[in-house]
Amino acid sequence: MTTMVSDAMAGAMAGAPAGSRNAGAEARRPETSDPRRGELAAFLRSRRERITPEQVGLPRGRRRRTPGLRREEVAQLSAVGVTWYTWLEQARDIHVSAQVLDAIARALLLDRSERAHLFALAGTADPSPASECTGVSEGLRRMLEQLEPFPACVQNSRFDLLAYNRTYRHLMCDLEQVPPEDRNCMWLAFTHDEWRSSLVDRDETIRLMAAKFRAVMAEHVAEPAWKAMVKRLEDASPEFREIWARHEVVRPADKVKVYRQSQVGIVRLTSTSLWTGPQQGPKLLAYTPADAETHERLRRLHAMALAQESAPVGEERAPVGQEAASVAGV
């Protein structure tokens, strides 16, 4: 969810060969006679058209005529330029790096076989041939719902929030009110006032988050989406710039986390990480109450979320904790 490069030419150069001075000339090249390029273009179109905006956390909008995702949406999700991605779907004879192909594979939710096919058509060696690029399955979404009233979410290694249940939605702020591209825990911890106010020990929490992010980024340091995330945070937050410059690293560890939920008060949660595949990609984060008081407060928060969700269609829904609180007996 998260930080994307929207400028067409800036993103395009992410896939250009080092030292290239002729990007403009690439744009004027006719379609190649290499049959693999035509196959690659058709394959990308078919994968793009099968994905709904909701699957990748994007709003559908009212005037959508394209089946599946638009080209600019795939470019946004993979942090490459619209022009560059368009050239790929036009079978242009352009060079595209393994890092860009990896980002596109993830944006298009390719499985292992589809990913291998993508790299084969592009004539590029896959740097991570065993990695899975699956999205959030329906079964995993049902698991999130079954964990209620405990908060739970699916998060990738870049801290993007891929899915979450009702309780997690309202734990730090109402995530449905946050633009999809901003649903990233790092971004919210450094820029979103309500999210930040929910962190009881904010200074220590954000310092540890940045250290965890840097440790994980060591395996993704050349990937455009990761670099764009850091650049966006540096531009938006002097606090992040100062912490990032320390080069602190720490490995993830499960521990008790304390949040100040705006409507039910302090909650103490034990976090548990469950990887959703053989590789350390997306993981399910489940939060269980560390004490009986937290358990009861989570029940109240969940009841408020259900009351808000069940408001009649067309009727303005009250924020969690206001009119909805009376239904929960608060």
Image (cartoon, helix red, strand yellow):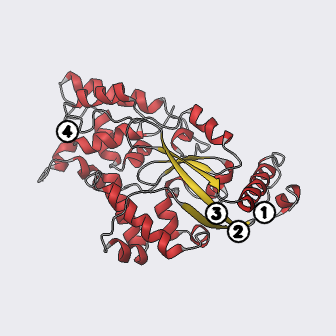
Q: Nearer the viewer, mark 1 or mark 4?
A: 1
> For the residue carrying disc 4, how many other residues have a C-alpha within 10 Å: few (<14), some (14-19), or many (20+)?
many
Q: Earlier in the sequence, mark 4 or mark 2?
A: 4
Label 1 sits on residue: 321
* Amino acid tagged 4: Ile
Decide which of 28, 299 is in the foreground and name it.
299
* Amino acid tagged 2: Ser
Residue 150: percent from left, percent from top: 67, 50
Say left or right for 215 vs 182: left
Judging from the image, what secondary structure is the residue with disc 3 in?
strand
Q: Earlier in the sequence, mark 1 or mark 4?
A: 4
* Amino acid tagged 3: Arg
Residue 97: percent from left, percent from top: 22, 43
Label 4 sits on residue: 94
Choose top left, top right, bottom left or bottom right for residue 84. Answer: top left
Viewer can see residue 8: no
Label 2 sits on residue: 262
Q: Nearer the viewer, mark 3 or mark 2?
A: 3
The residue under the point 47% across, 52% down is 160
Q: Looking at the image, is 87 positioned above or below residue 32?
A: below
* Contact between labelled residues 2 and 4, with CB atoms less than 8 Å apart: no
Say left or right for 326 vs 95: right
The residue under the point 62% across, 43% down is 62
> For the residue carrying disc 3, how many other residues have a C-alpha within 10 Å: few (<14), some (14-19), or many (20+)?
many
* Distance of label 4 from label 2 (alpha carbons): 52 Å
Judging from the image, what secondary structure is the residue with disc 4 in?
loop
Residue 213: percent from left, percent from top: 38, 60
* Distance of label 3 from label 2 (alpha carbons): 14 Å
